[in-house]
């Protein structure tokens, strides 16, 4: 008897990634997560498609063509709608399976078999890793690719509003050396039209003004060539006077070269929200030192997409561990409501981190990874409590 007790005490606690219990629960997790995702996607697509349904259907020449256009448009919208919801759907799907696991009495059999709480997390971890890879691919690659198709074909409201084939409205851009006003042809390469550049000194006084109908990029030197324009340079007492009938201070030129602290890649993706930018481009913009605006938004978005590779795993582990702690022997309404509220709070924390990071209230890396780290920490704390409690028929 002592020998058996000694063996039991020294038995290592390890994961069983491919055991029968893992395969059984993993199948249940997948079914329920797929059901939750389908419900959420149906609701999201209804809300998204209803205001623009007639616009999409009218692009077809007949009934079959209209149905095909709507179906294709729904498929293009799907990655962008599913990706933000997948972590929360994972939490709900895992919780659903765990509730059924408890109510059927299967959990009691697992406890009486001597399986540790850590070993029971293998199916949740496997599910989270697979769904994390899917979420990362959808949000980082498939979503921007589908939006690129919508913009090129001007499909739907977003596709028409974000059409990159026509120049943007005249914009004012703050640069380290001054101000730029221009219409942007996105390219690539980008082209500036109706250009006005105001360079200033350290004291804020305007030192140079350049205007031109067009400015083209010299990729090899990252400088801009202004054509058939005018320029003005002045001393401390001179001020520019545009179009003065009595004194013309603007000097005409045929060709003039101007250097601007502005990444041309940023101009190509100007006025486009970071979620529609492909991940490799997003990484380059986040690392660039010559992005006049929205640098924090690019970096935050990059870290959020990287964090999405582990967010489903963090949500799945939290749902499974909370179920082992509070739904060990029954499914009381207060415990179930508390677990659902915990999952919604985690979902809210993910969105709050994104908003805080994009608006400069939180460093981008913290905005992206604070929520996953806290979720893993919460799972570890719950497992610590579970391991200190007795499980099985005698620990009830």
Image (spheres, rainbow, N blue to C red):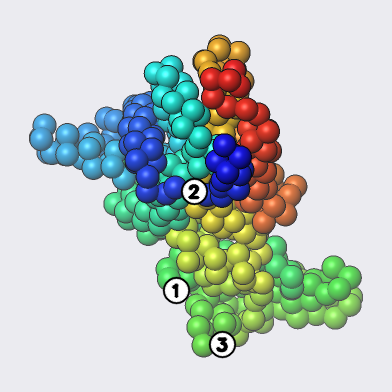
Q: Give me the disc on residue 15.
A: 2
Where is residue 318 shown, x and y percent of the image?
A: 57, 36
Where is residue 141 shown, x and y percent of the image?
A: 40, 57
**Which residue is tagged 1?**
189
Q: Earlier in the sequence, mark 2 or mark 3?
A: 2
How far apart are the two marked residues, 2 and 1, measured between alpha carbons? 53 Å
Q: Secondary structure at mark 1?
A: loop
Q: Secondary structure at mark 3?
A: loop
Q: Secondary structure at mark 2?
A: loop
Q: Earlier in the sequence, mark 2 or mark 1?
A: 2
Q: Residue at x 75, y 47 (%)?
A: 361
Front residue of this view, candidates 317 and 350: 317
- Tags 2 and 1 touching, CB below 8 Å: no
Question: Is residue 153 positioned above or below 21 on the image?
Answer: below
**Which residue is tagged 3?**
221
Q: Residue at x 60, y 48 (%)?
A: 10
Say whether residue 20 is visible.
yes
């Amino acid at each position: 008897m002592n020998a058996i007790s000694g063996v039991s005490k020294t038995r290592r606690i390890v994961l069983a990634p491919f055991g029968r219990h893992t395969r059984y629960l993993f199948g249940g997790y997948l079914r329920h997560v797929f059901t939750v995702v389908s419900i959420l996607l149906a609701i999201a697509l209804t809300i998204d498609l209803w205001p623009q349904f007639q616009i999409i259907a009218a692009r077809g020449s007949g009934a079959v063509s209209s149905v095909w256009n709507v179906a294709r448009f729904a498929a293009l919208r799907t990655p962008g709608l599913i990706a933000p919801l997948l972590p929360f759907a994972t939490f709900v799907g895992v919780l659903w399976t765990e509730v059924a696991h408890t109510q059927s009495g299967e959990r009691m059999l697992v406890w009486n078999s001597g399986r540790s709480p850590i070993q029971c997390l293998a199916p949740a971890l496997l599910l989270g890793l697979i769904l994390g890879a899917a979420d990362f691919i959808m949000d980082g690659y498939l979503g921007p690719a589908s939006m690129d198709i919508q913009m090129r074909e001007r499909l739907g409201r977003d596709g028409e509003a974000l059409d990159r084939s026509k120049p943007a409205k005249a914009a004012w851009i703050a640069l380290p050396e001054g101000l730029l006003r221009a219409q942007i042809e996105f390219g690539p390469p980008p082209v500036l039209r109706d250009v006005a550049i105001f360079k200033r000194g350290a004291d804020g006084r305007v030192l140079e003004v350049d205007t031109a109908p067009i400015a083209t990029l010299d990729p090899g030197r990252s400088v801009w060539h202004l054509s058939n324009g005018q320029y003005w340079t002045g001393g401390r007492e001179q001020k520019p006077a545009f179009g003065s009938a009595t004194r013309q201070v603007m000097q005409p030129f045929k060709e003039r070269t101007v250097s601007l602290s502005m990444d041309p890649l940023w101009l190509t993706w100007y006025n486009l929200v970071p979620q529609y930018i492909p991940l490799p481009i997003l990484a380059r913009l986040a690392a660039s030192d010559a992005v006049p605006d929205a640098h924090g938004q690019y970096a935050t978005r990059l870290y959020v997409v990287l964090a999405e590779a582990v967010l489903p795993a963090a949500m799945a582990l939290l749902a499974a561990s909370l179920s082992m702690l509070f739904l060990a022997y029954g499914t009381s309404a207060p415990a179930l409501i508390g677990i659902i509220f915990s999952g919604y709070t985690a979902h809210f924390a993910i969105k709050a981190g994104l908003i805080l990071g994009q608006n400069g209230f939180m460093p981008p890396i913290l905005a992206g990874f604070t929520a996953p780290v806290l979720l893993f920490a919460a799972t570890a704390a719950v497992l610590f409590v579970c391991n200190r409690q007795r499980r099985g028929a005698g620990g009830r």
